[in-house]
């Protein structure tokens, strides 16, 4: 059920990101909240549910803005593997590690996107703009903590038994209650 919650949340974030956040001036930067959701899923969820959620969100992003079909799911799954590999050595589930990890992961995604785009279409090389990338990294660092806090609130609300029962319409497992 977490996959459905993350998919609905991802769709809402993607709609807001592609409509309202496009009105933000370019010099201020445009936050990539969907990427923060992907990092949150990689930090918080187990491998199977996280990988399926990230694959679906990557396919959804491909449908909205993908140039090469399948590029976002592959890159996001590579970032998922990277975060899960680091989480075996460091306790990333703590809130303080998630924002720096999101910034480092976004830099890796930018590098992978440039390499894959250049290798798939060498006739029209993509532009590498340090100013834009640094602005995006700063934007992720600034909005990362509040956005992760909102995701934690949403997941805590979902985990509570009354909220899970209300959303799913499920009955209590204790029939003697």
Image: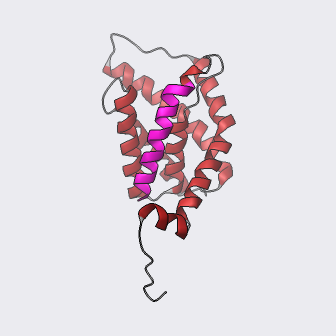
Whole-percent x and y of residue 68? 32, 25
Name the image quarter holding residue 116: top left
The answer to whether residue 122 is left or right of residue 107 is: left
- Residue plotted at (60% across, 56% down): 93
Question: Most prominent secondary structure in the magenta stretch?
Answer: helix
Q: Nearer the viewer, residue 16 or 166?
A: 166
- Residue plotted at (67% across, 43% down): 146
Extreme residue toward the bottom, this view: 176
Residue 81 visible: no
- Viewport quadrant of the N terminus: bottom left
Name the image quarter holding residue 155: bottom right
Q: Is residue 44 magenta?
A: no
Whole-percent x and y of residue 48? 38, 57
- Residue plotted at (40% across, 49% down): 53
Whole-percent x and y of residue 95? 66, 52
**In this rendering, is residue 16 above or below 50?**
above
Name the image quarter holding residue 138: top right
Specify start and end residues of the magenta stretch as a single range: 1-21
**In this rendering, is residue 44 above or below 126?**
below
């Amino acid at each position: 059920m977490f996959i459905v919650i993350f998919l609905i949340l991802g769709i809402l974030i993607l709609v807001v990101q592609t409509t309202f956040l496009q009105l933000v001036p370019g010099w201020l930067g445009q936050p990539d909240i969907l990427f923060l959701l992907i990092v949150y899923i990689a930090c918080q969820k187990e491998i199977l549910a996280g990988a399926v959620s990230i694959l679906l969100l990557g396919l959804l992003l491909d449908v909205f803005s993908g140039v090469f079909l399948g590029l976002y799911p592959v890159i996001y799954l590579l970032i998922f593997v990277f975060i899960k590999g680091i989480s075996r050595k460091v306790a990333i589930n703590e809130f303080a590690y998630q924002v720096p990890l999101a910034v480092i992961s976004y830099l890796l995604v930018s590098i992978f996107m440039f390499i894959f785009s250049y290798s798939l279409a060498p006739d029209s090389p993509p532009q590498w703009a340090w100013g834009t990338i640094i602005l995006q990294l700063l934007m992720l660092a600034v909005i990362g903590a509040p956005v992760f806090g909102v995701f934690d609130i949403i997941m805590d609300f979902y985990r509570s038994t009354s909220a899970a029962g209300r959303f799913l319409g499920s009955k209590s497992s204790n029939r003697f209650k």
